[in-house]
Amino acid sequence: MVKKSAERIYLALIFLFLYLPIAVLIILSFNNSKTRVQWGGFTLKWYKNLFSSGSIMEAFGTTLLISLTSALIATVLGTLAALGIDAMKKRNQAIMVGATNIPLLNADIVTGISMMLLFVRFTRLGMGTVLIAHITFNIPYVILNVLPKLKQSSRTTYEAALDLGATPVYAFFKIIWPQIRPGVFSGFLMAMTMSLDDFSVTYFTKGAGIHTLSTMIYTEMRKGIRPEMYALSTLLFLLALILLLFMNFGPSARREERDA
Amino acid sequence: MKIKKALCCLLICLAISWLFAGCGPKDSENTLTVLNYGKYLDPDAIEMFEEETGIKVELEEYVTPENMYTKYRAGAIDYDLICTSDYMVEKLIQEGEVLELDYSNIPLSENLDSTYFEFSKSFDPENKYAIPYFFGTVGILYNKDMVDESKVNSWNILWDQEYSGQIIMADSVRDSFMVALKLLGCSLNTTDDAQLKEAQDLLLKQKPLVYSYLVDEAQDEMISENAAMAVVYSGEAGYALEFNDKLAFSVPEEGSNMWIDSWFIPKSARHKENAEKFLNFLCREDISMMNFDYVYYATPNQKTRKALDLDLQENTTIFPPTETLNNCEVLKPLDDETTMKLNLLWKEVKAAD
């Protein structure tokens, strides 16, 4: 009995520490006072200001554009890479997996600075350079998600399809693709999250006048963060929550459960 | 399936075209690349400038002067105009990185009070390079109910046992040593070992009384009345006063630090004329007023100041009086050796029990 309640308290504490900061942020987004230490009454004005503020919406748009595009391209490249790695010999596979893992473990700031040094040599910094940098650090996440699915999939079915006269492309989309699809999808989501989150790499590779949410919030630190940012973060949190609920309890999740 | 595939292809094509659209060089454009502190310029003013002149402004922002220095020195972006603090301007002038201003292109600089050009001479001796943008001091923000007001005219109050555990000290090397050095009657730019050591002893002595070492969070702690006094910048004090009537601000008689954030044109500038146009625009009364409302620090623009409400004009927290300023010193860049020494002394203070 004591053990049971101790377990419960421990769990409750963990959730408290995980979610209390987010709760505070959500509450502050409804605070009518500009300072975070006074409660000035309930208001929705920060949400209204948020949508009428050109600079925030522009940064938000840039962030979405970069994360979606980079995740998409990285998913295509990463999936192709995973297919290639899967077809290699054991030893080469180990080398390739190791090589793709290095950028994953590398500190963001090192990636950022080295990319900047490279870009400055050839081109002007701008949106394109941020995009290339994001694709680069996203690819390993996709490979990491797709490769295990490929390992699980059966090669013999694919070969049987070829024997029965299917073209390789046809056989790929009929046999391999359905088996690795969940991996590709989660790789895409993970790449997008990483790209949304990223500060260091973006900070070093972006050109003048381009802002993502993370770089924008960072520069606001000296004079205090605008409450509109609390509102935006609240909305982003809700979006992530809905997405998660949908993934876990939505129609496709139920179908997979049944299949399993 | 087919539709899905087609959609996929289309998306990829789109994505790739985006990628390359952003890549091309765009040198010849009529642009202006500005590097400024975060939230230090009203975005509406930039829009107005773009509409009036047809020049496209690309604004980059940074947090600390050191941050700015790294960004500028990395050379990845060619900045046309930079705003930063006094000592960093001086450092860059010494390194030969600053271009001379052509005042004939900035006729509206007349709007700026010449007093502040005099102060700027401490880092730009002939006023050749920099135009002041905002200025202020460092002082004590205190709670009138918790502090004896007759004592706040001296830094000594920060060593008063009576306020043990209620004092917020600045969490920055130069600012905290400034307080101790001024109390000792020394220059805040001293490089003398003995004086620095003496200042460190004072700070060590003060440590048991300190509630916390803070920078930006100090104003929040003061608004919520968690401490009796804090060492803050005048700009932050002006902000805090808006939220709590019990707060007041004082610059002690021993003197303090005066800071001047200024604009200058770096050597990397490719659009010097546009930069000067923008400087002229910033000196215009209406624009300077917009920026004052947005930033709420003391503006050197005398026309703007005269147009303010009388009680705001006379607000000594936001606009430190000239007598106070005469008593203040501007920070100078220290040589590497002194910087290291000072950082070490400060680390010892922070690490002490």
Image (tube, coloured by chain):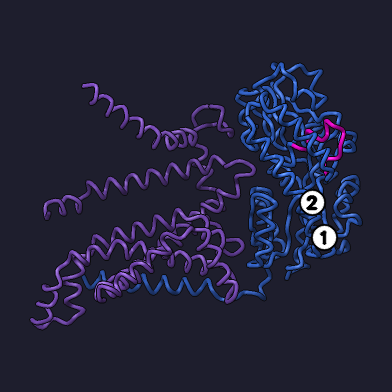
Q: Is residue A245 left or right of residue A158?
A: right
Q: Is residue B259 left or right of residue B227?
A: right
Image quadrant in which the C terminus of chain B is located: top right
B186 is within the stretch colored magenta: yes
**Disc 2 or 1, which lies upstream in sequence?**
1
Crowding at label 1, few (<14), some or many (≥20) Cα neighbours within 10 Å? Answer: few
For badge 2, the amino acid type reads: Pro
Q: Secondary structure at mark 2?
A: loop
As displayed, is residue B256 above or below residue B89? Answer: above
Does any portion of residue A97 appear in the rendered image?
Answer: yes
- Residue A233 spot, x, y in % from top left: 46, 44
Letter of the blue chain: B
- Residue B326 lies in what quarter of the image? top right
- Residue A92 lies in what quarter of the image? bottom left
- Residue A82 spot, x, y in % from top left: 29, 70
Residue in the image at 84% along x and 62% along y: B101
Residue in the image at 30% along x and 69% along y: A94
* Residue with the mark numbered 2: B333
Q: Which residues are magenta?
A: B177-190
* Residue with the mark numbered 1: B94
- Residue B262 spot, x, y in % from top left: 78, 52
